[in-house]
Image: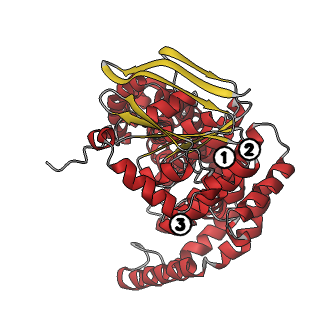
Amino acid sequence: MKFIIKILKDFPAYLWSGWGAIATILLFIAFWDVGNQVYGDLVLPSPIDTFKTLILMLEDKNVWIEINTTLYRASVGFGLSLLFGSILGLVAGFFITASMMSRPIVTILVGMPPIAWIVLAMIWFGMGDETVIFTVIIASFPIVFVGALQGTRTLDGDLKEMADSFKLPWHMKFIDIYFPHIFSYIFPAWVSGLGMAWKIVIMAELLATSNGMGASLAVARSQLDTPTALALVVIMIGSLMFIEYIILEPIKREVELWRN
Amino acid sequence: MEKLKVKGLNHHFGFTEILRDINFTVNKGEILSIVGPSGGGKTTLLHLCANLLDVEDGSIKNTFKSTAFAFQEGRLLPWKNVIDNIALGLLASGFKKREAIQKSKKIALRFGLEEEDFDKFPKDLSGGMKQRVSFARALVLEPSLLFLDEPFSALDIGLKKELQTVLIEMIKNKEISILFITHDLMEAIRLSDEILLLKADPGHIVKKFTYTLPQSQRDDKFTYSESAKILLDAEIIDTFELELK
């Protein structure tokens, strides 16, 4: 509780530090406009057109349905890989044999291109939710798993010994010794897993479903509707930035205050 | 009476013999130091006494009511601030949070930490300050037996003396007993009632030195002259391989 209050208290200062980032984004939009003036509306619609389309789209109920579909798939997929990745990673970290055995599997999972998984999933599950969710899981699971694994593998034996010397009861050992350390590894892994899930969900939808934002993107492409395509991209990036910079980053800062 | 009695202790790591036939007793109010070269099994012996390792052969009987351990490298929790680090042992032994914090603040001030340091994380502390925190964390428990693992080795002379003075004061006032290991003979002479010389490969005790003068009356002159005396001892020369080759 104290922790949440501290995060909220530091939040305005954190937001205030965001002016630099906003300036960069505005500069980027300026270059975008230059691109529009050079290449014309078909290739690169101007930012103002894009944002107008975006506002029109956001007023449309059907667009929200698509967004919700995508959100549902991404959160189910990411939620499952978060749960299983964290648990299996922790378990694997506690046993040397398990962590050695899991290494090649992780390499295969990380090394296999997501597009290949999409093709396989389409064969296995057909065109629908399952294919997308499966691909999201398979892409973000290894990231979370490795984070949890490393968190447990790198637990400091000296600190464990110190805890023993002070006869810390098991719950204190977990809360004060293991958890902060593991969390400092697992939390960044969650953040990158989330980014991965959000990218993969769009790609899988584009190829394997008839609804969701990815499918809308495919429709926009077939109709050469560049402003809509760009507006969709803005929604995707905007939502990812919101989650990462407004929700996750402030938490990360508080959690990792003790780090060098 | 409270005491720590080590009898016929042997220890192996795999096929390597680390300790052979160790016998000694720490009585209440006594300071016993174990000196010897690095890698001689001192730390293993201390960890066995503190029950951080399981005894394989021989026996260690500890009847002291409470014990605490101060480590060579501090071993503070990097994600906890100074006060929370000191309070760790208190909380583990069942003190209420508020009382533990209060006690920790009091002892922190006594160990020369400033109030503005209380909220700092270990990464922002100097080596000496970390060691003070580590000391405070052990001593705030008011243990009847304190284990020290080369606690002064990373400190400058001034700080070393300061912490030693605190210990000497505690020896004088309270009935604290200390078992500590060091490779610094002067340190051992300044603090100990009894010094055990541990020779390596495998670790075994070759000689005992006893000092009866109360610690509070030992001045620099005493320490230097006793050190000079002990450095001429044949066993010491042999154990630390002091002779010129």
Picture coordinates of residue B71 (x, y %)?
54, 46
Residue highlighted by disc 3: B126
Residue highlighted by disc 1: B138
Picture coordinates of residue B62 (x, y %)?
65, 24
Same chain for mark 2 and mark 3? The answer is: yes
Mark 1 touching mark 2, by CB under 8 A?
yes
Residue B93 visible in the snapshot: yes
Residue plotted at (61% across, 68% down): A54
Secondary element under disc 2, as helix, strand or loop, is loop
Left or right: residue A231 compared with residue A68: left
Left or right: residue B31 compared with residue B102: left
Does residue B147 sit above or below A243 in this rendering?
above
Query: How far apart in space, not on screen, are marks 1 and 2 (Cα)?
Result: 6 Å
Residue highlighted by disc 2: B141
Residue plotted at (61% across, 35% down): A165
Left or right: residue B19 compared with residue A185: left
Does residue A201 sit above or below A247 in this rendering?
above
Same chain for mark 3 and mark 1? The answer is: yes
Q: Quadrant of residue A109?
A: top left
Q: Mark 1: few, some, or many residues within 10 Å (few <14, many ≥20)?
A: many
